[in-house]
Amino acid sequence: MSLWKSQAFTVSHADGGAFESEGLRPFFEYRQLGIGEATNSAYGAHVIRAVPGMESPGTWHSHDLDFQLVYVTRGWVVFEYEGQGEHVLRVGSCVLQPPQIVHREFRHSDDLELIEITAPATFTTQEEDAR
């Protein structure tokens, strides 16, 4: 594998990728885009889609990471952020979630699909007290 500034060239196609249920939340499925492997885990990117019929319990939590961006490509999702209130994200909506912001996802459409980009690729998540 050739590396440029610790990164490898990678391409990911929807028809070649599989969604897996092993991820942070059981009500979502995840399709890795190969960014973690190409950047030695400095960055991560995946497509997340809802598992139809499964709902989020709305657990408050935070992530120990440096960067987290969410872009909705299908459906809708409702996030609530400490000090920022509720936000309905629809197709084309994008949110930058600052490091360690306390938040929760508590409603989404069955057809929700979004792209999440993080730095680093792997990070810890802490449950937080209800706000």
Image (cartoon, rainbow, N blue to C red):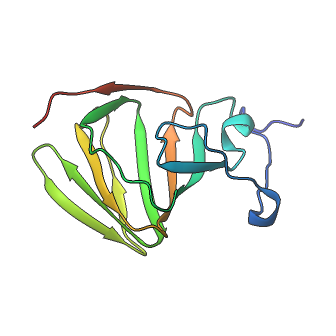
Q: Quadrant of residue 67?
A: top left
Left of 98 or right of it: where is 129?
left
Vertical comparison of 46 with 64: above or below: below
Of the 4 image quadrants, the one containing the C terminus is top left
Q: Residue farthest to the front? A: 53
What residue is at 68 percent from the left and 52 percent from the top?
Answer: 19
Q: Nearer the viewer, residue 129 or 116?
A: 129
Vertical comparison of 24 with 109: above or below: above
**Percent coordinates x, y for residue 53 in the rendering:** 45, 60
Left of 37 or right of it: where is 23?
left
**Percent coordinates x, y for residue 40 in the rendering:** 69, 29
What residue is at 90 percent from the left and 35 percent from the top?
Answer: 1
Q: Quadrant of residue 41?
A: top right
| Label tally | 0
What residue is at 16 percent from the left and 28 percent from the top?
Answer: 129
**Percent coordinates x, y for residue 68 in the rendering:** 42, 44
Q: Residue farthest to the right? A: 1
Q: Nearer the viewer, residue 25 or 31?
A: 25
Left of 90 or right of it: where is 2?
right
**Percent coordinates x, y for residue 89 in the rendering:** 32, 67
Vertical comparison of 127 with 116: above or below: above
